[in-house]
Amino acid sequence: MTWRLPLIALGLMATLAMADLEPLAPGYAALPYAIPQPGSYTLPPIKPAGDGVVIDAETGKPVSLHEVLGDRYALLAFFYSHCDDVNGCPLSMFVFHQLRARMAKDPELARNLRLVSLSFDPQRDTPEALRAYAASMAHTPMGSTQHQHHHHGHGGMGSDGGSWRFVTTSGEAALAPLLSAYGQELQRNLSAPGQGGGDISHVLRVFLIDPQKRIRNIYSVSFLHTDLILADLQTLLAEETGAQQGVADGTAARRVALGPGDSREGYEADDYQTRSRDLQQHRGRPADLLQFARRPPLGLPPLPAREGVELTPEKVALGRKLFFDRRLSLNNTISCAMCHVPDQGFTSNELATAVGIEGRSVRRNTPTVLNVAYLELLFHDGREDRLSQQIWGPLLAKNEMGNPAVGHLLNRIRGLPDYAGLFEEAFGEPLNMLNLGQALAAYQMTLNAADSPFDRWHFGGEEDAVPSEVKRGFALFTGKAGCSQCHRIEKDHALFTDQRLHNTGVGYPASVPSKKQTERVQLAPGVFVEVPLEVIDRVSEPQAADLGRYEVTEDPADRWKFRTPSLRNVALTAPYMHDGSLSTLREVVAFYNRGGQPNPLLDPAIHPLGLTEAEIDDLVAFLESLTGSNVATLVADAMAAPIGDPGGIDQ
């Protein structure tokens, strides 16, 4: 059959001939600005790339889209061959044509990149039509590229599996799930009866997909440019090479920086300067999380069986995906990980108390989820005893994730295409209230961090694992200071908690009516003002006194009792106490050295300790020695997790 020149060429010629048409997209010319240096930025995974059944234009046979994408990086563009919007499908064809020309000259690029054009017009773009379209594309001059003829036939569909693959679908039923998975919304403008065809209105998006079938970037009309794509590809390849080198030399996890990305230490001083962390330090690398559950690090006992969840890779991966998904909140803005920030000790170093949807204040500090599987009581007041049940607290709390009902959230997740089949694969049954909780529990049950310097000294017998001040601090911890009465250490392991609740006086003053008339408020570094309380009362919701365990039992003896937290990794989890009122470990030790906060129900174990300044230093040094050697590995894995993004493709 005779086939016309591809519309991309016609569109370009028409555009150049008519000055009053819309300006060409940046992808048709040299960029007017310098592109970022490859490797100077990161491209975290956005979400898994959707899969479905397509028809390979070369063979005419059905195949999965993932199989077409192959085991290399891939660019996926949705198009239709009759598109006449020069800044639409023809733009993707132009950019792909340039990339294919580069690939013909660069074997390394050809080995690492595949181009895939998927038609959303199966009625007209049959396999036969796409084969002819691809063949004519191979002989159409495009821009300034010199190597227009690919060394394989059929416009790039060759015996190597194709550097440029064209695919379509069997019809609308097969196409719809793919459009949904990639957030492609179409409006079909039907032509007059008997004329056939018709235009299709759509928003151009091209997806950069890695070999693990994760979307790493999405290019719109303004950013679809050959040079930008190549810089992104070089960045990902460099990241991959660095991760492989890290596996070989054991340094990759250690490169992960812990703590807030923009530390607020010293923020009260008028000479404070921001110290935002380079994004290079936020590169992630997946880890085998199950190893930390099946063989907990030195210093931890075997995992308790109370959850009743048999851990599998599928359950852990699903729970990890849920943990980082903002779509689990009412307005798609808050994920579990936004309060339990991985590189901030899986808590939040920057907030005394948590903040939920719409900036709503939560009255308690975010507890770490490191080693949370060992806790017999959950929440600061101990009101839950199973992780799979606990998760529904924040999911339904109006000031946290805000979901109005269990069914509301379950139906929302059921409507997300990237969760299709995942619960069936992990649990052998569709999503329900129980297995959602179990999936999130499964991920958290792997976040076990120990093998600290203390562990290697105390349980491992390595005398040189800690300095002398840590050893002196340990003697104080178990002796004069009496910390181990509540933060227990056993013969062969240490959880550093007695799994009970105690009244130390923290929060007691806030529950007693105050006689002060003003509140000191910081406006900026070094800038404070005294604001009348009557003004604060007019613009804020009255804050209820936090009575701790009493709110669960309504037993007056339980007033101001809170759960004993574990001290493992405590150097990473500031600020401290259930209300985040103490900023440093030294402040915490000083608080207990004073005998806590006097109140009518103060725990008998809390009394002045009589520690000297040097002894306080030693005790702090001991606490700082409790950071697990595998924390960086857990954080690096978290940084590699897909993020459920309500913008763009995840709606």
Image: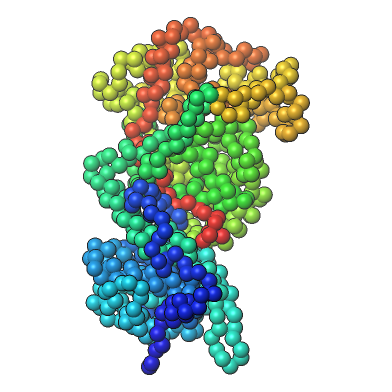
Q: Residue at x 47, y 18 (%)?
A: 586
Colour scheme in the image? Answer: rainbow
Quarter of the rendering containing residue 537: top right
- Quadrant (top left/top right/bottom left/bottom right) for the C terminus: bottom right
Q: Nearer the viewer, residue 332 or 155?
A: 155
- Quadrant (top left/top right/bottom left/bottom right) for the N terminus: bottom left
Judge from the rendering whether residue 353 lies leftward or rightward of residue 556; answer left or right.
Answer: left
Q: Is residue 98 above or below residue 391?
A: below
Q: Nearer the viewer, residue 77 or 590?
A: 77
Q: Is residue 587 above or below residue 348?
A: above
Q: Does the rendering let one see residue 369?
A: no
Judge from the rendering whether residue 100 lies leftward or rightward of residue 504; answer left or right.
Answer: left
Q: Residue at x 74, y 16 (%)?
A: 515
Q: Is residue 166 above or below residue 257?
A: below
Q: Residue at x 34, y 81 (%)?
A: 140
Q: Does the rendering let one see residue 450?
A: yes
- Image location (x, y in percent) of residue 70: 33, 67
Q: Is residue 208 above or below residue 378?
A: below
Quarter of the rendering containing residue 56: bottom left
Q: Residue at x 60, y 25 (%)?
A: 527
Judge from the rendering whether residue 290 lies leftward or rightward of residue 348; answer left or right.
Answer: left
- Image location (x, y in percent) of residue 550: 66, 27
- Image location (x, y in percent) of residue 358: 64, 44
Q: How many marks?
A: 0
Q: Nearer the viewer, residue 391 or 9?
A: 9
- Image location (x, y in percent) of residue 40: 35, 47
